[in-house]
Image (cartoon, grey):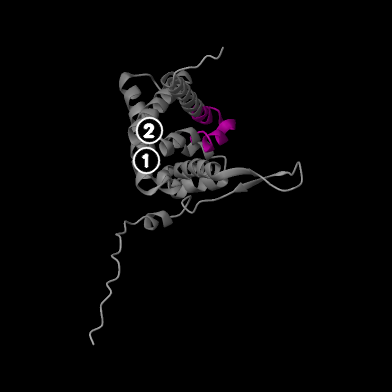
Amino acid sequence: MVLSMPANRVRLCTSSLQTVAIGLSLGLSAALTTAALVIPDLWWLAWVSLVPLFAVIRAFRPMRAARCGLFWGACFYGMAVGAGVVVPTTSSLGLFAAIPGGYALLAALLTRKIGFNPLLLALGWILVEIAFKPLGFDQGLLARTGQELVAIHWIARVLGYVFAAALVVAVNAALLALLSRARLTLARSGVVGAAARCVVRLSSQMMFFEQLFARRRTHPRAPPVHRRSVV
């Protein structure tokens, strides 16, 4: 006897599992970001903790990405309050959720327009750093997580903490672009047990503005007109 499940129920189960997985990844992302801020020895976590957030920005439509940003901000607020970094208030909860949500919305719109560009996303994060400054983060969210590195220290002193944070965000977004372009292929040959080889393809959209000009709208060209020669 074979039991079959209706297709709509299968889709519902798949969608529920996907929602749970996305929620767990965003919660883990917020937890790692909080740990990088609170524990000095774990500063390096901030360089990879935002990958799930950029994954939803790249994969989802703007409104769904905005909801994921709101959820990430709410998780970060709860963990920051638990760590004693933020004083809990109703207004601060709204701002902590609205700022990442608004960034995710605008970043998803930009991604739909020109493609996933880590450099532009990193520059856009500067607005997030500035918005979080009145909430008790005088040096922003991510700038102080890399102070142990000499390069980040001097970037923060010369250009400001917002550009140091933008560098951290660029590394997160570029890491996602790199991982999404990596493909593991098996070498097909006549020899059984051939070793697998990893092929990594880097997109030109990772750190350059080439994509801004590569997707211009073009119009179809009319067929050539054949003129009969008059004798």
Residue 125 higher or lower than 158, as above or below: above
Q: Quadrant of the N terminus?
A: top right
Disc 2 on helix, strand or loop?
helix
Label 1, on which residue? 107
Could you tell me which residue is drawn at 45 percent across and 54 percent down? 208
Q: Which residue is mark 2?
A: 65
- Secondary structure mostly seen in magenta is helix
Q: Single out the residue that lies furthest toward the top.
A: 1
Vertical position of residue 77 compared to residue 146: above or below: above
Element type where label 1 sits in the image: helix
Closest to the observer, 100 or 203: 203
Q: Is residue 61 above or below residue 177?
A: above
Residue span colored magenta? 32-50
- Tell me whether circle 1 and circle 2 mark residues in contact (CB < 8 Å): yes
> In percent of the image, x 52 and y 27: which residue is there?
38
Quadrant in which residue 40 is drawn:
top right
Residue closer to the observer: 57 or 198: 198
**Of all residues shown, which one is farthest toward the left?**
230
Query: Of the residues under marks 1 and 2, which one precedes in the sequence?
Result: 2
Q: Could you say where residue 180 lies in the image, as x and y percent from the top left?
A: 52, 42
The residue drawn where x is 52% and y is 14% is: 3
Q: CA distance from mark 1 to mark 2?
A: 9 Å
Image coordinates of residue 213 in percent, x first then y, are 37, 58
Residue type beneath disc 2: Ala
